[in-house]
Structures are given as C-alpha cells and as structure tokens.
Image: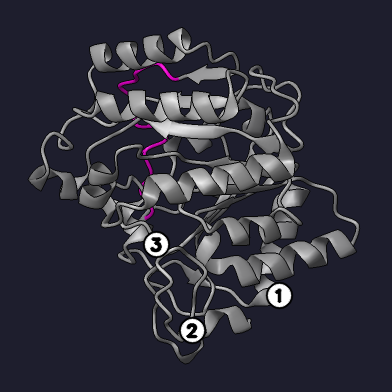
C-alpha cells in the first residue's frame, strides 16, 4: 500500500499522504470505500450478457467533472461502506458466485493498490473471470502498463478532444493528451475488444472498447474526438457513442449543460462516426427513461437492475 503515501496514482499527482487519513485529489484516503456492488445491466451488451456485469463502484474520483451522473459518490456526498482486504475479497467472490460475466471496477484508478492485491489473490486462487477496468480515461500511461498485467478488458472514456472544454469542466486542459496516451497503452497491451458481439451472446474476454459521451451544445468536441480516435486507431476501434447525458443539480449554473442533448445533435454525431467509417460501433437511442440514472442513496442505485433482461 506504499503507493498511497505521496500519492501519484492519478495524473493530478497531488502527493497527498493518504495513509495518514489525508484525502488526495480524488477525495479519498487509503481507506477503501465501496459505493455499490452487484450485477449490473447498464453497460454495453458485450459486458452485461444475460447475467450482468459484476460492477463495483468506488467512492471518489480525480476528474471532478461538474456534470458527473455519479456525482453523489464522486464528490463524497454519499460516502459508501468501508471494506478491508478480506471484505473486498468476500465481496468479489459473492459477485462471482452470482454468475456475473466479469468483475467490473468502476472509476478504480485511485484504489489501484487494493485492486491489484485483490486481482492477484483471485488469480492465485484459480479464478478466471475477466477483470474489467472501467475508467474515465484520465490515467497515467505508465500505470496502465501495470494495470494491464491484470486487467483483461479496458473500458475507458475519451471525454474531451478540446483542451479548453476539459479545463472548463474538470480543471485540466491536459485531458486530451493524457487520455490519448492512456488509450495507446491500453490498445498496445490488450488490442481491440474480443469478441465484439453486440448481441451479448458471447461476452468479451479481452481488449479495449472506448466510450464517448455527447455533451449538449458541444457537438464539435464529439466530432473532434471521433476524428482523433479514427486517425490514431483506425476504423475497427470498438466505440460506444453515448447519448445518455442527463443534467444534475450542479449543471443548472452551467448552460448548455443544464439540458440533455437534442435528437438532432445525436443524429449528427452518429452521422459523423459513420462517415468516418467506424465499423464496431454501439449507438445508444435517446431514451426518456431513468432506469440507469443512478441514485446512490438507494440500496439499489439503478432501477434498471431490478428488472434485468429475460434470459
């Protein structure tokens, strides 16, 4: 757990001694806090399959995006439960016993030492379930190389191609460069998602799928992001172009983030992706349901997980 002292686990490299109880830029000390865990059906079908993804949501986050849909836990408002190493191991085994298709570590980077310890222990015990690293893309490429020793699947965001937008939303205009470097390291280590089965009949065992969320009023950021990804990784990069942005209370002070994307904005984003020739593309229809908009004050944060798809 030495990495928690003078912490540099995220690109902010705040240097906090989290072992002393002092929170880092992520808002967390060296005490592991889990906000939610259970079979999750809100990911792409190649991860949820028929039995769900074993999603473990960690408290805290180093990004500080003011529109974050997980704001209750990323900001520390809903603290989550404290687990030691044995409790974390038991939680993981419980998920495996429920038949989930993977262990899905959501916003995990600031708890890498705990996760590394858990994954090495599980592999040492003969557990073969895929480990899924579900992140913001705001990762050190050097650390990605270590994570890839254990992570089978990488599911990173590529949020911002525009440095000025990144600075306005999360306070770091380095995001496009940092995230692109991290993506290069992920693809170099694991390649593209395999298998890529949009039906979810055969769930992914290894590789990378990149997510990009369309932001209201910022269609050009999406087009820039798509062009960058196409130029860097080619047309076969597995890509999920998401429309699910939903305003939260903090966005009221930041128009146009105080509204959802329009159908025309999303249609134009999809047209751009198709014109660029992306082949392995998930498209997310605009929805008026909130089944997978979380409320971490509830025992089951995602209403959609109460009604999983029929086998």
Judging from the image, what secondary structure is the residue with disc 3 in? loop
Is residue 248 found inside the magenta-colored segment of the image?
Answer: no
Q: Is residue 181 above or below residue 238?
A: below
Q: Is residue 73 above or below residue 113?
A: above
- The span from disc 2 to disc 1 (Cα, nearest Å) is 25 Å
Give whichever of 223, 194 is nearer the camera: 223
Quadrant of the drawing holding the C terminus: top right
**Mark 2 touching mark 1, by CB under 8 A?**
no
Q: Residue at x 23, y 45 (%)?
A: 164
Give whichever of 80, 44 is nearer the camera: 44
Judging from the image, what secondary structure is the residue with disc 1 in? helix
**Mark 3 touching mark 2, by CB under 8 A?**
no
Residue 93's x, y, as percent?
75, 58
Q: Residue at x 70, y 36 (%)?
A: 207
- For residue 213, say whether it is visible: yes
Q: For the residues carrying marks 2 and 1, which lies nearer the camera in this image?
A: 2
Marker disc for residue 65: none
Q: Which residue corresponds to mark 3? A: 62
Give whichever of 159, 275 is nearer the camera: 275
Q: Which badge, 3 or 2, is on the more N-terminal residue?
A: 2
Q: Is residue 151 left or right of residue 5?
A: right
Q: Residue at x 36, y 38 (%)?
A: 293
Query: Looking at this rendering, what residue extends furthest in the bottom direction?
Result: 20
Q: Is residue 186 left or right of residue 96?
A: left
Residue 46's x, y, as percent?
65, 27
Q: Is residue 37 above or below residue 240?
A: below
Magenta part mainly helix, strand or loop?
A: loop
Q: Which residue corresponds to mark 2? A: 6
Q: Which residue corresponds to mark 1? A: 86
Q: Which badge, 3 or 1, is on the more N-terminal residue?
A: 3
- The span from disc 3 to disc 1 (Cα, nearest Å) is 26 Å
Judging from the image, what secondary structure is the residue with disc 2 in? loop
């Amino acid at each position: 757990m030495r990495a928690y002292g003078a912490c540099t686990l995220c690109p902010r490299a705040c240097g906090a001694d989290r072992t002393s109880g002092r929170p880092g830029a992520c808002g967390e000390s060296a005490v592991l806090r889990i906000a939610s865990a259970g079979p999750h059906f809100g990911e792409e079908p190649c991860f949820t399959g028929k039995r769900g993804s074993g999603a473990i949501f960690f408290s805290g986050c180093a990004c500080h995006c003011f529109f974050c849909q997980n704001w209750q836990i990323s900001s520390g408002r809903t603290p989550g439960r404290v687990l030691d190493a044995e409790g974390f191991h038991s939680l993981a085994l419980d998920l495996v016993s429920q038949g989930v298709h993977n262990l899905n570590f959501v916003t995990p980077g600031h708890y890498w030492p705990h996760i590394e310890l858990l994954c090495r222990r599980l592999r040492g015990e003969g557990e073969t379930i895929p480990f899924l690293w579900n992140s913001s893309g705001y990762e050190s490429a050097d650390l990605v190389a270590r994570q890839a020793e254990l992570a089978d699947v990488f599911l990173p965001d590529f949020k911002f191609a525009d440095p000025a937008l990144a600075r306005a939303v999360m306070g770091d205009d380095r995001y496009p460069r940092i995230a692109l470097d991290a993506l290069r390291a992920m693809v170099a280590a694991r390649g593209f998602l395999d298998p890529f089965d949009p039906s979810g009949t055969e769930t992914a065992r290894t590789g990378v799928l990149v997510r990009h969320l369309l932001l209201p009023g910022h269609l050009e950021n999406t087009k820039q992001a798509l062009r960058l990804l196409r130029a860097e990784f080619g047309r076969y990069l597995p890509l999920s172009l998401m429309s699910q942005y939903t305003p939260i209370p903090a966005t009221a002070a930041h128009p146009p983030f105080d509204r959802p994307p329009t159908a025309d904005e999303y249609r134009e984003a999809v047209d751009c992706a198709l014109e660029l020739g992306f082949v392995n593309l998930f498209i997310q229809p605009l929805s008026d349901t909130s089944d997978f908009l979380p409320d971490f004050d509830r025992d089951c944060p995602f209403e959609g997980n109460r009604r999983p798809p029929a086998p």
